[in-house]
Amino acid sequence: MVTCFLRRGGRVLVLKRSQRVGTHRGLWAGVSGYIEMGEQPRETAFKELQEEVSARIGQFRLVREAPPITFEDPPSGKVWTVHPFLFDDLGVDVHTDWEHTEHRWVRPEELGSLETVPRLEEVLAAALGGRVAQRGTDEKGRRAP
């Protein structure tokens, strides 16, 4: 799986997952998607930005592809391997697809105030090239307060 963060003026784009998606409904996430057979993570990242927020090539620039992060998600019974990506916004007019109900541009330090998919702060820290925060999770696998 890839999780992409689009950065604009010190803020990053987060999306609220719709009730129509398979996991983590109603939670905030980055632009995310499964890596399909035969695809490379970078290829998936570019594809997901185009599909989920209507970004076009030339409207964003890859800044960093961080090493993957693997973790267990007890509520879903899954083990996720997430490939974090950071992109700079070069003029994306964000229009979300059916997978999301809204979007926000937030400062990285504000992410903790949102109800997010598991380990989103850690994935963002990796994408930004910072130290990866080790935080506990609640009974649903989300960041503990």
Image (cartoon, helix red, strand yellow):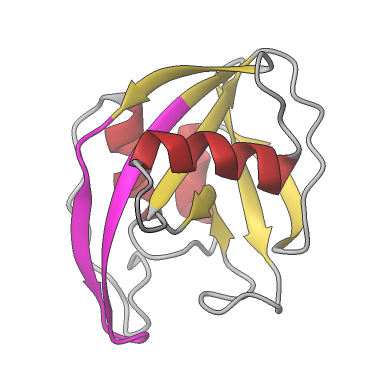
- Is 137 on the left or on the right of 33, as rendered? left
Q: Position of residue 35 (x, y in %)?
A: 40, 54
The relative height of residue 145 versus residue 67 in the rendered view (above or below) is below
Residue 53 at x, y percent in the picture: 72, 41
Residue nearest the observer in this picture, 46 or 13 = 46
Q: Residue at x 27, y 84 (%)?
A: 74
Residue 36 left/right relative to 89: left
Circle count:
0
Determine the image quadrant of residue 144.
bottom left
**Image point 52% across, 74% down: which residue?**
24
Residue 7 seen in the figure: yes
Residue 76 sits above or below residue 133 on the image: below
Q: Is 75 covered by the magenta stretch?
A: yes
Quadrant housing the C terminus = bottom left
Residue 78 lies left or right of residue 104; in this view the side is: left
Report the span colored magenta. Answer: 66-86
Quadrant including the N terminus? bottom left
Residue 36 occupies quadrant: bottom left
Is residue 109 visible in the rendered image? The answer is no
